Amino acid sequence: MKPLVRVNDFVVKFANVNGSGSASANRLFAQSIIRMGVPATPRNIFPSNIQGLPTWYEVRVSEAGYLGARGGTDLMVAMNPQTWDKDVAGIVPGGYLFYDSTRPLPAAKFRDDITVLGLPLTAICNAEYTDPRQRQLFKNILYVGALSAILDIDPVVIEQLVAEQFKAKEKLIAPNVHAFRLGRAHAEKSLPCPIGLTVRRADKVGERIFLEGNSAAALGAVYGGATACAWYPITPSTSLAEAYQRWCARFRTDPETKEKRYAIVQAEDELASIGMVIGAGWNGARAFTATSGPGISLMQEFLGLAYFAEIPAVIFDVQRAGPSTGMPTRTQQCDVLSCAYASHGDTKHVLLFPEDPRECFELGATAFDLADRLQTPVFVLLDLDIGMNERLVAPLAWDDTRRMDRGKVMTAEMLESGRDFGRYLDVDGDGIPWRTWPGTHPTRGAYFTRGTSRDRYARYTEEGDAYRDNMERLLKKFATARTLVPAPIRRDAPGGSRLGVIYYGSTAPAMDEALDLLAAEGIALDALRVRAFPFHADVKRFVQEHERVFVVEQNRDAQLRSLLVVEEEIDPARLVRVLHYDGTPITADAIVGEIAAHARVTPLRRAQSHGSQPQGV
Amino acid sequence: MTYLPKPKLHHPDLPKNELGLTRRDYEGAISTLCAGCGHDAISAAIVHACYNLSLPPHRIAKLSGIGCSSKTPTYFLGAAHGFNSVHGRMPSVLTGAHLANRDLIYLGVSGDGDSASIGLGQFAHALRRGVNMTYIVENNGVYGLTKGQFSATADRGALNKRGAANGDEAIDMVGLALQLGATFVARSFSGDKAQLVPLIEAALTHAGAAFIDCISPCVTFNNHAGSTKSFDYVREHNEAVNFLDVISGRETITLEQEPGTVELVTQHDGSVLRLRKVAGDYDPTDRTSAIDFLARHHQAGEIVTGLLYVDPDPTSLHGHLGTATKPLNAFDDAVLIPGSAALAKINASLR
């Protein structure tokens, strides 16, 4: 088997033991490639465990800029004996295996169609260090050094990164650089360097930044003016609340008094989290919670209250594979329906679907404006893939002329001037009533908030007409929401196509790549990235303009497709499911495989008669 | 229960408080509870207490869960915003409201089903967080709206209306509140206005988590022989440890001639709690001995009432969090939004 030869286009996978301190070394590796101007996308693959179980870190290097997962491993850095067999099996034919050769392994443990690169890392460390913790930690830096030689990564770049990383703890710079050089020297001495996979300087990164979605969403909450956060720890959303804490410590602390212009409460459970968010929203603060699927399940009753009593709230749902505990550290887009219709009775909620950390920031901030404007819960649906992984994205931007849209809040002056206040009175024809914050005026504007039915002036009633009147107004408000949520982003194939594809959220990078691959196969597709529910009018238009539309999702039940069928009354036969839901991030190959297979058995001539040179068969 | 609308005209000679408001200005809509319900007496006591303290009604936020008791906030303080939330979840909603605006006075009204059964967790956590609030449980030992099932505060052996005995141990809300770190704990009886009104006043002026367990007989489902939450039973077994007067900081304190039986407790806001002690050995500022005293008297079948514990200088949630003294809902863009310059720095640090 001929060894792979690829420049700036390969996948490296690190197999480590959880808790061994490999994360920062692996991150260093990914960052060094980015610093060389080559896009690299890391993904953490980890178990629901703190110490001892296997974890993987996969880095896709792609000068072409494909940031989605690819599948297959070109170079395996096998540091975990426990997963050896599976790791070795995952290497593509012609690929490479780098491992710690301190203990000899029988030939049966290897494959003859790959290149094996052994370096006695443990032995080198044991000879160099006496402290067991040092032996462990420096072993990680050591293999980064070895990899830099194997893949021809500029050592200056890595040494610079080490210096930046330990800027605050300068004493650590020299020993880390030493370990790095040690690993590099050993590799240069005893391994064929470089191998067929190499990193070559390029300028394909540009101004882009390297950021994790949860952290970006938390920053979005800060820029969105959120002052209250109530949350309960749950993977993969925990780091969102923790990031909010860090951003607030930096940006929301009174420089003189050190007072905090924010409040974060770690609640006793998700019921209390959303209760606090609703209480704060009712009382005029912008508030949010961060959770995942099981938390959404627990919040159902409260979400119905917030919908019916019309209280702003923002919920960041970092989705993971369900149902039940499911695969808590694996990614999915499986809460679309449970969020869209959360709670008992007739309810519908606003959902936002960020594609990457940059949109986590943008839509994270926008969610607070929408919640206030619409006086209703707004869900931001991240998932583990974008939430807990760093991604190369365009720099974050903010318009300093932008102001928080607090929506229709009647002030003491407005009440004093004699304006009619009915909490559930639709004075503007958009279904959105005015509200007052508690404590506004001594004699006007007070009302009783309740989950029971009431009339337009918030007076309790069980009259059917008043109940219906209110429920119809809520529908009208939802129709208004359609015009306010972020519009979908459409990209037509050159010359257009009769086939369309709809996708959303973290599927975006895999879809970008799949569109290129399909185009290369002659299958032209118009693409629409949906960014919100209720669906913007452009979504139905898009479906109407195409004979058949693929709906690509990371769940079993084609949840967004269901929403399209139910809410837009689209003929289900026109919407073809393309599903990936094994807990791994969706890949371009998976999308291409399904769409191409479908294109082969369906009358592609329609597309042919329309598109340029489709082959398909 | 009456269907007659409340007359809006006030008697011209109704006394006025420091704000120039009459007691009627603190009332709400007419009650829809059963005639004679203990809860209505508590609502009346809340009206009295707020009037006596000259609190601006609109600066109070009244929150409740679900149940008969949780309906009552409609029946007092009509000028205040109210929130009838979800069953057992008033404490979290109140906590969130309090995060948003620490300047309002928070009054949580709940029942024994709401706080001891479905909402026991939220009850516990709101108290241990030290949310600055007055939390009143209108405790009748029974589910009223669903017609007479035992609640978690019903005593073991108590009989329901049909004569069936409750087999489960009762949850003692006062004992829990003491253990959970509430800084003001009292028990009273809806039939004892003279005791209840000053307790509510004291709780409202308390700058921490104040809890009042108010036994409030259910005239429809739990006021029969064999009930331990009936008017007769509570009157017979009520053991008051003290009687309370609340004196605001502005008033001069004149001690009545009762040597050895009066204790003055000055609260953080300058108000003085004047306690006329009945049980000579009872110290309401000692949490541990209060727990012990309650346990001993509970065993003897007595319902201890009065101000059971107070920390005159309590800490509270915003204090623990270090939140700004200005309400969070009053900050504007200039303070809250870091802007593009800060974002440029963040971008630079992420390359």
Image: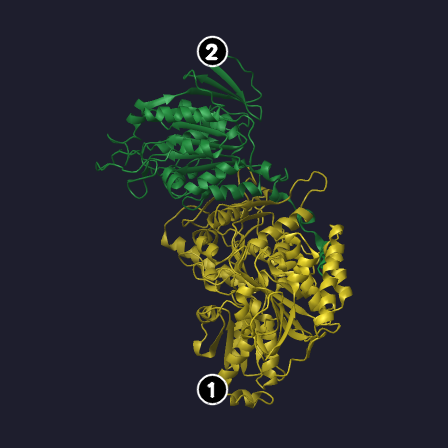
- The mark tally for this picture is 2
| Vertical arrangement, residue B210 with respect to residue A249, above or below | above
For disc 2, the marked residue is B260
Provide residue A452's location: percent of width, then percent of height: 40, 49
One can see residue A343 in this view: yes
The residue where tag 1 is placed is A601
Q: Position of residue A549 (x, y in %)?
A: 51, 78
Q: Nearer the viewer, residue A345 or A468?
A: A345
- Amino acid carrying label 1: it is Val
Mark 2: give few (<14), some (14-19) or many (20+) Cα within 10 Å: few
- Secondary structure of residue under mark 2: loop
Q: CA distance from mark 2 to mark 1?
A: 98 Å
In terms of depth relative to the viewer, which is nearer, A36 or B85? A36
Q: Position of residue B127 (x, y in %)?
A: 48, 36
Q: Horizontally, is A251 left or right of A78 in the view?
A: right
Chain shown in green: B
Chain letter for mark 2: B
Q: Position of residue A288 (x, y in %)?
A: 55, 51
The chain assigned the colour yellow in the figure is A
- Mark 1 element type: helix
> Given the current orientation, which residue lies at the most extreme right position?
A156
